[in-house]
Amino acid sequence: MAKIAAASEAPVRPHSLTLNDRKTLTMSGVNEVSSFDEKQLVLRTEDGQMTVQGSGLHVTALLLEEGRVSVEGKIDAIAYTGRAAGGKGLMGLFR
């Protein structure tokens, strides 16, 4: 028998990111953009909260229906805090 997903179960999107020359960042598996300005971008991903810090940051693509976000600017740091409930995420690699 096929399992039927409950309406409250959100689809799990694979989370990945590609950073090119610390100038362009493309991400997938993004569920929400919590806040952003030219120095910081805070997102909720499948692997927990992700913070991107830098200068001159601007969002060049925002496709939350697909879970994709692209950012340009000088990227100085990328950090994860917490993790999605039930997910192993990247944080599990550093224990």
Image (spheres, helix red, strand yellow):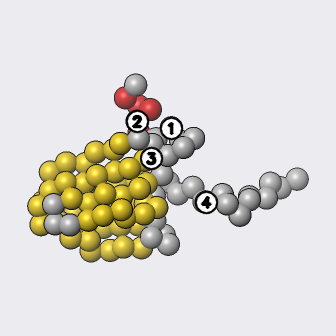
Q: CA distance from mark 4 to mark 3?
A: 14 Å
Rendered image quadrant of residue 94: top left
Which residue is depicted at the point 80% across and 54% down?
3
Q: Mark 4 or mark 2, which has the lower sequence index? A: 4
Q: Residues within 10 Å of mark 3 (few under 14, many from 20)?
A: many
Where is residue 88 drawn, in percent x and y? 50, 38
| Side of 31 relative to 72 (left or right) | right
Q: CA distance from mark 2 to mark 1?
A: 7 Å
Residue flagged by tag 4: what amino acid is it? Ala
Which residue is depicted at the point 31% across and 57% down?
42
Tell me the residue that label 2 is attached to: 91
Q: Mark 1 or mark 3, which has the lower sequence index? A: 3
Tell me the residue that label 4 is attached to: 10
Check whether the beta carbons of the residues at disc 3 and disc 2 lie within 8 A of each other. Answer: yes
Residue flagged by tag 1: what amino acid is it? Lys
Which residue is depicted at the point 26% across and 60% down?
41
Tell me the residue that label 1 is attached to: 88
Query: What kind of element bears circle 4?
Result: loop
Q: Residue furthest right?
A: 1
Q: Mark 3 or mark 2, which has the lower sequence index? A: 3
Rendered image quadrant of residue 60: bottom left
Q: CA distance from mark 3 to mark 2?
A: 8 Å
Position of 79 relative to 19 (above/below): above
Residue flagged by tag 2: what amino acid is it? Met
Where is residue 27 drawn, in percent x and y? 36, 60
Which residue is depicted at the point 49% across and 46% down?
84
Check whether the beta carbons of the residues at disc 2 and disc 1 lie within 8 A of each other. Answer: yes
Tell me the residue that label 3 is attached to: 47
Q: Residues within 10 Å of mark 1 (few under 14, many from 20)?
A: few
Position of 95 relative to 12 (above/below): above
